[in-house]
Amino acid sequence: MESIETDIVIIGAGPVGIFTAFQAGMLDMRCRIIDILNQAGGQCTALYPEKPIYDIPGYPVITAQKLIERLMEQASPFEPVYHLSQRVEKIADNGDQSFTVITSTGIEVKCKAVIIAAGNGVFEPNRPPLGGILEYENKSVFYSVNKISDFQDRTIVIAGGGNSAADWTIELSRIAKKIYMIHRRKEFRCTPETRNKLESLESNGKIELVVPYQLHELAGNNGRLSAVIVKNIVSKEEKEIPADFLLPFFGLSMNLGPISNWNIQLEHSHIVVDPTTLKTSRNRIYAIGDIATYSGKLKLILNGFAESAMACYDIYKVIYNSPVNFQYSTSKGIKGKESE
């Protein structure tokens, strides 16, 4: 097992987790960030990287992916270390005012405090029950759109009848060669305006609505799709649709995962914290962002940023047994930025 020491372990590499690395760095505390996803960004990167966000101070509009890039750039002078594609399985109390955080890949990180910034917990896409689908995932089957240009002039099958499926059908129709939208019902769970756009795109030949059908089988080789076989819900007729990519949008399943075993007070699948410090019921463990709950809680990214600062300042006092010598960033500056 790889053994590491740091000041703070941050669980969750979403926007609030990444900003916490910056806040800790401003207080000269080192961080390791652990996340189950294979890239930093949390839901911003995994679910809606190119969708606009309008309530980030200083940015009238910014895409989710661009926000993550800016946050990582902001934290980079403090050299946070990211441990991705693994989840925290256990937080062991060492008995000397420290923890050992153990991940699913066997990494052990000794730290002085833990900040849980796990969003809504562990989330995974609802995978359609298709034989051999794992072989195609992240090659030609994707549950989110990270880079629109990857789909340029390609044939795409989008499955689902909700807002995500409809929105991405409309968006990708601008660049795709052809899109087939599969849904088991003739009615779609999207706004009338969106439905009108789908019908307009179909009449122009940009997309084809394949209803009432459901996914039945995948055809291809070495993780590369050649076709998607669908079956009619009523007649059981099968149809083979040529495809370069399949995008199933059947929502997400979310759960707390190992968090529920960490001896921390929970309330309705959220972690109860002291709103003045963000402390949990377990000493030296804090929770911030969407995972944390208290009276009057607002689930906003900007609120998570404020909670991050509050938690880091309290951790500094706990670790060093002294109050912070507070300085504004304009006075203190940031490592490597003083001369810019």
Image: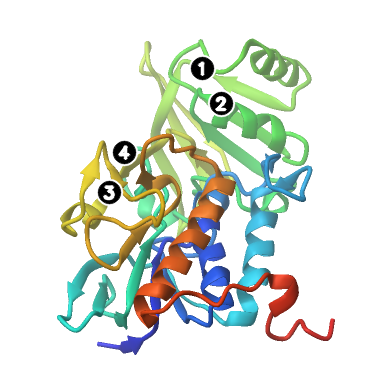
Q: Amino acid at mark 4?
A: Pro
As measured in the structure, the alpha-carbon distance from the residue carrying label 3 to the one carrying label 1 is 28 Å
Q: Which of 313/20 is in front?
A: 313
Badge 4 or badge 1: first in the primary sequence: 4
Residue that numbered label 1 is attached to: 189
Q: Which mark is residue 106?
A: none
- In the structure shown, which secondary structural element does the residue marked by tag 3 occupy? loop
Quadrant into which the C terminus falls: bottom right
Q: Is residue 101 left or right of residue 169?
A: left
Closer to us: 225 or 58:
58
Q: Which amino acid, mark 1?
A: Arg
Where does the image place residue 50, in percent across and percent down from the top left? 67, 46
Spatial CA distance of label 4 from label 1 is 21 Å
Q: Residue at x 23, y 80 (%)?
A: 97
Residue 243 in percent (x, y) is at: 57, 42
Give the mark nearer the N terminus: 2 vs 4: 4
Instruction: Name which residue type carries label 3.
Output: Leu
The reply to whether the C-beta atoms of the residues labelled 1 and 2 are less than 8 Å apart is yes
Q: Dot 4 surroundings within 10 Å: few (below 14), some, or many (20 or more)?
A: few
Describe residue 322's horizontal placement relative to residue 64 as left or right. Answer: left
